[in-house]
Amino acid sequence: MTQLSLKKDDFVLLPLGGSGEIGMNFNLYGYQGKWLIVDCGVMFGDEHTPGIDVIVPDISFLESRRKDIVGMVITHAHEDHIGAVQYLWPQIQCPVYATGFAASVLKRKLVGTGLSGQIPVEVLPLSSVFTLNPFDIQLITLTHSIPEPNAVVIRCKAGTVLHTGDWKIDPSPVVGQNTDEAALRALRTENILAMVCDSTNAMEEGTSGSEDDVGTELVKVIAGQKQAVAVACFATNVARVHSVALAAAANGRRVVLLGRSLWRIYESAQENGYLTDLEPFLSPKDAKLYERQNLLYLCTGSQGEPRSALSKLAAGAHPEVSLLEGDTVIFSSRVIPGKEKSISAIKNNLVERGVQIISDKGGDIHVSGHPARDDLAQLYDWVRPQAVIPVHGEYRHMKAQAIFAKECQVPHSIVISNGDVIKLNAKPATCIGKVATGRLGVNGVRLQNINGDAHKAMHKAIEYGYLVASICINSDAEIVAPMQLSCLGLLEKKELQAIVTEVEDAVMEALDEVSDRQRQNDAALLEVCKKAIRSVIRIETGKKPVVEVHLVRLD
């Protein structure tokens, strides 16, 4: 349902994405008929969404409420928090608020979309305090794997909520500022209604670790390599880019950036004063002036993305760079659930080329940007909220945080799902309703319901095959010309030709048995033909393909 009845003083949280899943973060806060959006992110397709690379939340709930949206606040520049702006902003058309680095990243993402210069982006300084009536907003600087991650404090007459965004406690961040512990501790005096909190690593004991330690380990790992080295990481992990660059320099190597997204992030970082202490990165063309053993290739593709730089290197298909036997590839990233097969495929290709692989299991060459249990406990103690509402995680992560919060003496915790309407100023915070939510796939220039008929048909055609039959009949429903068959993903051409006669005979037999009334009904004849064709194909292949029949009457 999308009908929602709220009292004037109800202060509510409504997630449309990011609760029960990792990615696609989109959270609404409502009060006095107005709505504040926090983050607008994507998630990426997999084998279950063929033809769809990018997925965004269905925000149809806001269609009739556009005039009541006071603004969108972006916590940081990761794709799962900012990547859907270009797809969903036309439905929202509200001001967007972000600190400098996120604004720079968004500006570059919009180039070529037709929205460049159209979206009103308000660039905020760190630790900003501003008003989007009826909400008073405060940004609190945290640490993460990307510059300028912000927690968002949302105040209204009904109370105050802390929305953490993505965060960790890093005592030695290599890029950006330290966590603003004083600002977080100050919230303790406000009796925070709820802390809406990152759950990604809620099942992990200890702390998430420091990026500074990763840099130290990378120096050692790279020192042991005699030939060219490639490092794969998330393009938006600016802290890791910095660590890799310093480790390369410590080993007398120049860094070559491979992948457009890395260059965009590098430019955005420098525009905001980050990565300016490093020796300039090389392009693949510039790298040809150096001996290979003096180079380190920094690549996109740590999750097996098929069009990434690393994927091309592994397949020997990169237009400017090749990996040779004896070279080394370092995977400095964690495996996102669901990406195991694609990563394994790249690793197999690398091994076939004689390339050595080093992953995070072989050394401390990666730390997470999300809070483990000791980090969570520390933040609970600093803020002392009345309730913890886990988000940004699959159900198991969110449930683990809810249980852990209670163990840490947080009075209340509640596990929510996308579409739940949570009254924050209830005692305790509780679900008071549900609205319809869903996922939309980016298909070309369109947003397509991935649970809709069109996508289901495409998925079925890819999985079971697709066959088209052209059948010419006369007014008596007799076949009067040779049947034409074509298929996709089902049979080879010679195999298809071998069964044309069998298919034609089955269709003729089926048409002979129809009644005189049915012979004049094209819709009925189509179903008879499809059923006969499916029967033959099922016997020949064991599959039930999508069958399309073009019926032509020749009088």
Image (tube, grey):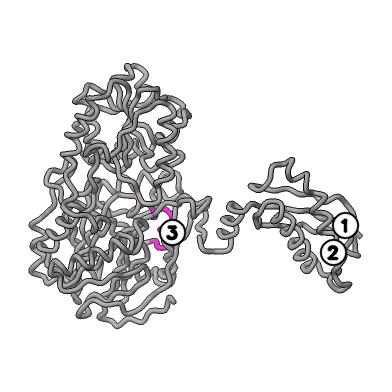
Task: Point out the stretch of residues depicted in magenta.
Answer: 83-93
Q: Which of the two marks, 2 or 3, is nearer to us in this view?
A: 2
Q: Nearer the viewer, residue 220 or 273?
A: 220
Spatial separation of the CA atoms under disc 2 and disc 3: 51 Å
Q: Is mark 1 on a helix, strand or loop?
A: loop
**Residue 102 point in image, percent of width and height:** 28, 49
**Residue 379 point in image, percent of width and height:** 14, 60
Q: Report the residue at 34% width, 29% height from top.
A: 356
Q: Tell me the amino acid under the disc marked 2.
A: Leu
Q: Is residue 386 left or right of residue 84?
A: left
* Residue 479 numbered tag: 1
Q: Residues within 10 Å of mark 3 (few under 14, many from 20)?
A: few
Disc 3: which residue: 90
Spatial separation of the CA atoms under disc 1 and disc 2: 9 Å
Q: Report the residue at 24% width, 41% height from top.
A: 366
Q: N-terminal of the two: label 2 or label 3?
A: 3
* Residue 511 numbered tag: 2
Q: N-terminal of the two: label 3 or label 1?
A: 3
Q: Is mark 2 on a helix, strand or loop?
A: helix
